[in-house]
Image: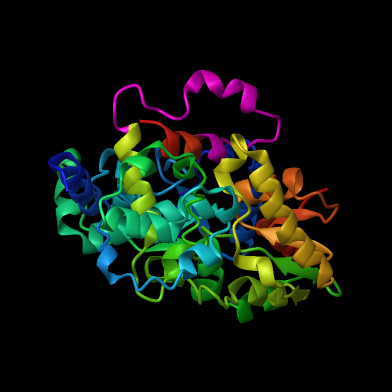
Amino acid sequence: MKVSYYPGCTLRTKAKQLDLYARKSAEALGITMEEIENWQCCGGVFTTAKDEIATKLSSVRALSEAAKKEQILVTVCSACHNVIKQTNHAMQNDADFAMHVNRYMAPESYDGSARVLHYLEMLRDVVGFDTLKEKVVNPLSGKKIAAYYGCLLLRPGQTMQMDDVENPTILEDFIRALGAEPVIYAQRNECCGGYVAMEDPASAQKKSKKVLDSAASHGAEIVVTACPLCRYNLEKNGESDLPVVYFTELLAEALGVKEG
Amino acid sequence: MENNTNRMKEQILRTSGVNPLKCMRCGKCSGTCPAYDEMEYHPHEFVYMVERGDIEPLLKSESLYKCLSCFACVDRCPRDVEPAKLVEAVRLMVIRQQGQNHLKPDQIPEMLDDELPQQAIVSALRKYAK
């Protein structure tokens, strides 16, 4: 099976492991990720303003490419996922916004028909966690892993439609499928401090430390995330030795396709 | 309410799509806001200050740049008021004016370190500059 893939800016630079192991693991699961040609950066954050049009066009172009190929559009980074899914939702539900967008897109137009899935959703809804479990050759038995959702993966829930926003299970089910033990802790869907870390690192330190302290107090040995900015904040500003890894690194390890 | 204030309020409501009259002032948005301690005006205050046209203090407040856009207030509001969308609309009202960018590109190099992901830079520029 082939899917369209939108990697995004950070997966080509600071988060190469997130990208590399996503593609390798997909191959091991029988899925080819075809990169969208000439994709442009999503901008990292979705602007909720109804009259912001041009900032969302890069997402619309990616959506339109996937729709033309009649493929699911898969993202791996939490931020790209958030921006592209929210943009698609606006194209489907805000006629005024869609009209303005399509004036830019002319002579082409995009009708909102693409289906966007986060890689984790692809594992759950296309591959299936039971099938994933069968493909695991190197189970991560005995490892206590804390899933860190952060903010962008799930919220806003009505738009993202990924999981229960307050009591999510998708990452825990993923961890179980790999043979490890998920750790449930209070701060798993609270914000790490995000981009505010750039001009106010103290703000990010407070939030990231709270997350890692909460995970550690429940016995976590590893924290797993899908977001490069979450990882940065937790590692840089979390004031903890708890290792933070991308979910794709664990996946590739369990599937036996991670080298070194 | 003077005309200019009225116009600003209308612009903010139109840009955000928020109806502040839905708010029942339970304070849950501010209670759940991870940036509460850093903010001068909190999410619930944005809602009632926009509603009563008290917009000038919000335009001048650093609170606009402390919101993390984490959507906690959006998802946890029992009345679907979505305060973060108001914060966004007020911030845009400021930075859409010429010369009012909160973050300028030449400030960025001193904020960088070896690990900072590109995602942080593009996000900050999108939130803080036009």
Q: Is residue A238 above or below residue A133?
A: above
* Residue range of the region highlighted in magenta in the rendering: B96-121
Q: Residue at x 72, y 59 (%)?
A: A210
Whether residue A19 is visible here, answered yes or no, is no
Which residue occupies the foreground of this view, B126 or B52? Answer: B52
Q: Position of residue A140 (x, y in %)?
A: 81, 70
Q: Residue at x 29, y 50 (%)?
A: A64
Q: Is residue B107 above or below residue B51?
A: above
Q: Is residue B105 magenta?
A: yes
Which residue occupies the foreground of this view, A71 or A152? Answer: A152
Residue B84, by quadrant, is bottom left
Q: Residue furthest top?
A: B106
Q: Is residue A69 magenta?
A: no
Q: Position of residue B88 (x, y in %)?
A: 37, 48
Which residue occupies the foreground of this view, A37 or A52? Answer: A52
Whether residue A168 is visible here, answered yes or no, is yes
Q: Is residue A189 above or below residue B106?
A: below
Which residue occupies the foreground of this view, A157 or A138? Answer: A157
Magenta segment, prevailing SS (helix, strand or loop):
loop
Instruction: Report the coloring of the rendering.
Output: rainbow
